[in-house]
């Protein structure tokens, strides 16, 4: 039996009883039911366009060919992309059309194909990537994720994804439970990143400084959570050393209504909080990393999910 046949068989099994993500809700997505992710087995996407706001090694000058998928299995209360995470925006497309989107982004000189929050469509994405690669897709593929991914599920992408770009959002189980109802998040994220490192065996860059292979882990600092940020950075540095790049982000933007339930999330991260985290990372010897400068906590940095390119 071929690997393609095995993948199709597993897709059919999982889409009738989905346990792809750590929620393992068992939804019959092929039968039209929506899982915790809010999606059936039909690919739903909200935007496909060149994106210039990723890290320099991802966007470069040409931009990252970014596809934003609708739905999310994590569901953080402060989500910056809430309109698509909740599935309220998006268009259903086929695997063939998604492959065509990848090729069109390559024609637009994108540095890579950037798949944002697509874990619940992992089989469909794998099929689309195989089709696109057979038709000439050559640029690297980036898997951009919340970090809430089963390591075994990520194995379906081995050989298809070149760069993994996971978040590492929460260090404490209590925080993960409070803001995402996912007390297991820290353990899941650790296992997922370990699998990503195994697959990519990077980092590798081209002569322009654009990443071709590797893992770029991100941490979005939350207001009042400097200690957790430090713990995450220490763990990544001590565990993976020069096998990983780390992006420390200060762009947390309070979304409407979040402070009504979580008062502490009703403000931006202060300059002092960010400086404390960066200073700690430098003390630990961080060299392979990215920091943000200037005013980044603006809603204008949130993409317009207008079905462009879909």
Image (tube, rainbow, N blue to C red):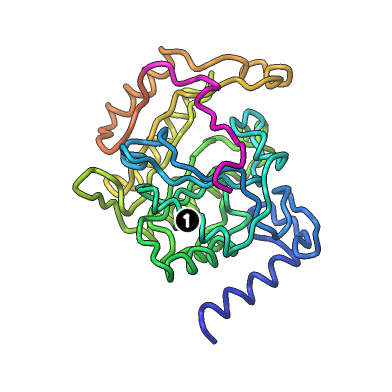
Q: Main secondary structure of the magenta part?
A: loop
Q: Report which quarter residue 41 is drawn in.
A: bottom right
Residue at image mark 1: 102
Q: Secondary structure at mark 1?
A: helix
User: Which residue is found at the position 58% from the left and 53% from the top?
Assistant: 119
Q: Quadrant of the N terminus?
A: bottom right
Residue plotted at (57% across, 80% down): 5
Q: Residue 72, position in %: x, y?
A: 65, 45
Q: Residue 69 in the image: x percent, y percent?
A: 60, 47
Question: 149 above or below 272?
Answer: below
The answer to whether 240 is drawn above or below residue 4 in the figure is above
In the rendered structure, the answer to whether residue 280 lies left or right of residue 24 reads left
Q: Is residue 235 magenta?
A: no
Q: Which residues are magenta?
A: 294-310
Q: Is residue 117 left or right of residue 66?
A: right
308 sits left or right of 214 in the view:
right
Q: Residues within 10 Å of mark 1 (few under 14, many from 20)?
A: many
């Amino acid at each position: 039996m071929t690997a393609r046949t095995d993948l199709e068989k597993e897709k059919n099994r999982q889409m009738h009883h989905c346990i792809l993500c750590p929620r393992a809700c068992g939804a019959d997505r092929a039968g039209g039911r929506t899982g915790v992710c809010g999606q059936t087995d039909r690919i739903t996407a909200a935007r496909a366009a060149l994106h210039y706001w990723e890290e320099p090694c991802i966007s470069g000058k040409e931009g990252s060919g970014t596809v934003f998928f609708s739905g999310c299995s994590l569901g953080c209360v402060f989500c910056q992309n809430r309109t698509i995470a909740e599935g309220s925006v998006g268009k259903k497309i086929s695997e063939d059309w998604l492959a065509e989107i990848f090729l069109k982004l390559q024609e637009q000189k994108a540095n890579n194909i950037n798949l944002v929050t697509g874990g619940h469509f992992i089989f469909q994405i794998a099929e689309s990537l195989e089709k696109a690669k057979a038709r000439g897709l050559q640029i690297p593929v980036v898997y951009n994720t919340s970090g809430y991914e089963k390591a075994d599920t990520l194995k379906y992408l081995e050989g298809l994804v070149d760069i993994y770009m996971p978040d590492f959002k929460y260090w404490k189980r209590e925080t993960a439970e409070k803001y995402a109802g996912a007390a297991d998040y820290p353990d899941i994220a650790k296992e997922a990143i370990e699998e990503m490192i195994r697959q990519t065996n990077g980092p590798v860059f081209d002569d322009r400084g654009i990443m071709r292979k590797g893992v770029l882990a991100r941490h979005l600092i939350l207001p009042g959570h400097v200690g957790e940020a430090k713990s995450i950075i220490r763990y990544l540095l001590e565990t993976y050393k020069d096998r990983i790049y780390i992006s420390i982000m200060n762009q947390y933007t309070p979304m409407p209504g979040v402070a009504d339930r979580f008062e502490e999330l009703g403000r931006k991260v202060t300059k002092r909080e960010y400086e404390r985290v960066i200073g700690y990372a430098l003390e630990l010897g961080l060299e392979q990393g990215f920091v943000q400068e200037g005013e980044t906590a603006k809603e204008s940095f949130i993409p317009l999910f207008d079905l462009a390119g879909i």
